[in-house]
Structures are given as C-alpha cells and as structure tokens.
Amino acid sequence: MKTRLFLMLLLCGAAAVAAVQAPQMQNAKLVNRETADLRGEVGRIVAANQPAWIAYAAPMIAGEHDMCCYSDYGAGRSCGCALEGGNVSITASETGNPTQHLENTGYFYVFLRSEGGKAEKVRAFSAGCPIDADGMTVYWLGSPKPADSVALLASLISSSDSEDRHDRIAGQAVMAIAFTNDPAADQEMDKLLAASQPRSVRKKAAFWTAQMRGKPGLDKLAALLRNDADDDFRRDLTFDLTQSKLPQAEDELIRAAHQDPSSRVRSQALFWLAQRAGKKVAGTITDAIERDPDTDVKKKAVFALTQMPDGEGVPLLIQVARNNTNPVVRKQAVFWLGQSHDPRALDFIESVLKQ
C-alpha cells in the first residue's frame, strides 16, 4: 500500500513538472535547451556574446498575481508584452486597478536578456501573458530548481557593475525572487533586507516583501521599523507597510507614529496612516497634533488630516484651528482648510473673519 502511494505521488510530481509549458510567444526564434544546470546553461548562452533572451519557469507564490503589460482599447482591456519594447511588466498590485486574471498555473516566467557577454535585463511574466519576442532568439530552459533560480537572480543583483545596469536588473530581479514559492526565496529576501546591502536594494526588497511574503514578511519589516539604525530606510518602510493587506501593518504604523525616535519617521507614518483613514488612525493623527514634542511633526500631522478621503479630516482641522494652543499649528490648520474648498471649511473661515 505504501509503495503504491509513493508511486502515485511520484507520478503526480512528474505530471506537475510536465505541465510546465514554454511561454505564449510570437515572432520568436525558440531554441529548446531544457536543463537541470541553470547557472551553467545561462553562462554558456551569455558567453556566446549574441543578443538573445533566456526564459525559464519558476513556482509562483500563492495568490492571484498578474504580471503583464496592460492597455485599454475602447471598453475592453488587453494584455501582452513586447520583449524588446520600452514597456515593462506590471502587476495588479502596483497599479491598483482591476485586471483580467491570467491563467493561474502555479508558475511564472523569468526572462533574461543576454548581450555583450552579460545578462543585461530581467523581466518576469505571468504564465498566461502573451509575449512578442520581436524576432529575437529565445532559449527555453524549462523548469529548473527554484533555489537555482533564486541564486542566479541574486548573483545578477550583486554583480551589477554600473548604476545603469543595476537599475535595469535589480528591481525586476528582486520582484522575481519575491514571487518565487520556495524557502530559498525567503532566505534571499532576508539577505536583501540586510543593513549591509545598498539602500536602493533594501528599498526594493522591503516593497516586495510587504507585497508578497505574507505575515512572516510583515514581521520582518516591523522588526526593521523598530530597530534599524537608518532613519531614511525606516522612513521608507512606513510606505512599504501600506502595501501589506494585513491589519497588523496599520498597528505598526500607529506605533511608529507615536514612538519612533525620528521626527521624520513619525511624520511619514502619520501621512500614510491618513491614506488608510478611519476613526482608529484619525485618533493617532490628532494625538500627534496635541502631544508630539516636535512642531514640524505637528504640522505634518495637520497636513495628514487633509489626506483623509471624503473630507473626513475637515471637522478635525476645524477643531485644531479653533482650539490648538500652538499658534503655528492653528495657522497651518487654517491654511489647509482654505485649500480644501470644502463648504464646512469656508463657513468656519467666514465665521472667524466676522469676529
């Protein structure tokens, strides 16, 4: 019985591997080079010193994720990417717009552009995203070990020998690692978040950790927001936390708005809290106006009230303008009330003028 079960599992595993198909492409000179030696085969293709694309499949982290290039045509919406074009692959979470859901295959594609003896570009696409290869040769390497993919992408990030090449590679390479459903991806994302990394890499890693790595990823970012020595990085982390859909992200922003030792971090946390709005964060913002020892933070908190949707911050601004003991803060509240063009704000300003 155990032998039969083992064989069934083995066959199911083989079927899952066999189900991985080459990308949907047009205008491609497809060369099949399926291999178990990802680094070696990529190295051989790159060493040929001919412009080409290299493609392979990697397991995708759970959830609905669209990585394609979208265009609006009339009432419809279409997707498809040109490898050699200026467009870049985008995700639904980046745009905030609803998109048609591409085929959920459990894997996605990593594309590397080889030219001049180097990998010069990284792109990632959902399995159902149509791709125009623009007449280029595309080497299809199949479905290598996920850990090998992560190691290859990490090596491209670390070996970028110029700022321009780094910009072309790092963002999409970090994204591709974050999308990979494998423990090696968690380990590599931790390394990319480390203080020893360039801040630009850490920022990209933090953004995609918040987007893709769930509660464990959020816990790592929260620990960094509490303990990292780089104020500028912690300030950027307040935005990254807004990319998480978990309620604990809001709690951590509230903590930072109250307790972070840097006034710049507290101010930025207040700003992003205002974007989320609601009674819970409104109390945090007004508390900062009343209690924060730094006048600049108080002023930023007043501005944060203007960012609350549907005019929710206007009554709070009126209250600040009427009752706050700090004349600079009162003046700031009146200024933003005047900018709001809200009838309630105009009524308040008119009442002040008539006194």
Image (cartoon, grey):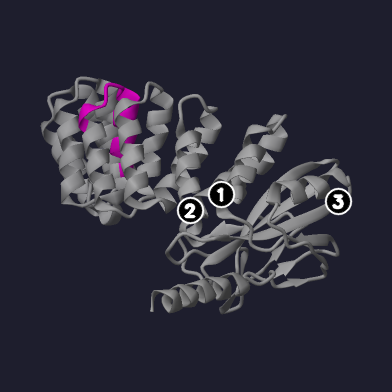
Marks 2/1 in contact by CB < 8 Å: the verdict is yes
Between label 2 and label 3, give the one nearer the viewer.
2
Q: Which residue is mark 1?
A: 147
Q: Under tag 1, what secondary structure?
A: helix
Between discs 2 and 1, the one toward the N terminus: 1
What whole-number distance in Å separates the C-alpha atoms at marks 1 and 3?
Answer: 26 Å
Q: Which residue is mark 3?
A: 51
Between label 1 and label 3, give the one nearer the viewer.
1
Magenta residues (range): 258-272
Identify residue type, mark 2: Asp
Q: Is residue 353 above or below residue 83?
A: above
Q: Under tag 3, what secondary structure?
A: loop
Marks 1/3 in contact by CB < 8 Å: the verdict is no
What whole-number distance in Å separates the C-alpha atoms at marks 2 and 3?
Answer: 30 Å
Q: Which mark is residue 182?
A: 2
Identify residue type, mark 1: Ala
- Say whether residue 291 is magenta: no
* Side of 323 relative to 163 (left or right): left
* Side of 271 relative to 57 (left or right): left
Between discs 1 and 3, the one toward the N terminus: 3
- Say whether residue 267 is magenta: yes
* Quadrant in which the N terminus is drawn: bottom left
Q: How many marks?
A: 3
Q: Position of residue 231 (x, y in %)?
A: 38, 23
**Residue at the location (50% across, 35% down)?**
192
Can the viewer see residue 72? no
* Side of 178 relative to 252 (left or right): right
